[in-house]
Image (spheres, grey):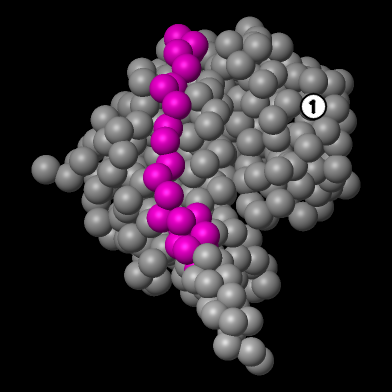
Amino acid sequence: MKKSNFRIYQILVLILFSLINFQVDAQIIYLPRAEYGQRLEPKGRIITGAGQASLSSFEEYISAVDSVVLPEIYMDYFGLEQITEKNVMGRMKNWQKFNWPIIPQIGLAMTHDGNPEKHYEHKIANGLMDSNIHVFSNAVSKYPGKIMIRLGYEFNGHWNGYEPDAYKMAYRRVAKILREKLGDRLALVWCMALDGERHDYMNFYPGDDFVDWWSVDVFGEKHFTHKALKPFLDSAHAHNRPVVIGESSPRRVSVQLGTESITRWFRPYFEMIANNPGIKGFSYIYWDWSKTRWADWGDGQFGKNLETRKFMIGELKKEPFQNGYRAK
């Protein structure tokens, strides 16, 4: 290689590395949050959460972020058909283990996970499961704080089997009973899955009278440019509803990749939040997926990697998050 060509090659390499470093280190600027005045909506800030029906993963998330911003949302799950007061009260003990206010974000299913043929929203719609609804509402009403319920979450997912008309009727029936029992300390959340095959989401919409927040679940790196994401967020704004990311984790982008994981998932994730003022909450599943039946998803426990942990803490130190609860 000629000396002049080699010098050009060196310059190009330096430019490339500069661009990569700029992409990793560039400041993410958060637009001011929109204000909609809905139930449980934080004013001017973004609430954070973790879990997925696991006290240990919630506590591990707290440790990973070094209590920079204490998560207010605790993710939990119930199936309405299998509901018992004992089960709810047992889970409630986890929500009350902390010395700051916790908002349980409950995924309340009207189907059986992994068995879409066993969906039962039509039974709920016809009043055949009112006793289950009352058992659940009476139990959760004993929790002294605020509650978010993602009712019939991931409504458009083929893995749930929901049918639009029956889903809407069931959602409204459950919502009425829950509202009567819990009043304004309850926020009803309507959640779409980007992985779902159906994106005619308004066919599933129970109506503004029954929904306080809209929600979307974000996993794969392609979700950030998914054709349904922006229209959904724009529609939420048009309906005057804040958005919470109901579930999120860096699917198939293991935190062990370090800088690559930041470039491919963590940075786009926070840029999505930063650029959409209607997003006012997120929930992160702090799991090492490689140890679950979704082993190919990789490791989502960002605290295990110095780079991903530093990046996550750096974002949570910013103003939209720093108005929340912090360690004393």
Whether 25 is among the magenta residues is yes
Q: Is residue 178 above or below residue 98?
A: above
SS at circle 1: helix
Quadrant in which the N terminus appears: bottom right
> Residue 122 sits in which quadrant?
top right
| Residue nearest the observer in this picture, 309 or 139 | 309
Segment colored magenta? 17-38
98 lies left or right of 282: left
Is 203 positioned to the left or the right of 193 in the image? right
- The residue identified by callout 1 is 201
Q: Give the class, few, some or many, for how many residues have Cα within 10 Å of label 1's Cα (few <14, many ≥20).
A: some
Amino acid type, mark 1: Tyr
Locate residue 151 relative to residue 7 in the image: left or right: right
Residue 182 is situated, as x and y percent measured from the top left of the image, at 45, 17
Q: Tell me what residue is drawn at x 42 percent, y 32 percent.
A: 30
Q: How many labels does the image show?
A: 1
Can residue 289 be seen here? no
Residue 258 image point, x, y percent: 47, 70
Residue drawn at (65%, 73%), measured in percent from left and top? Answer: 295
The residue located at (83%, 33%) in the rendering is 199
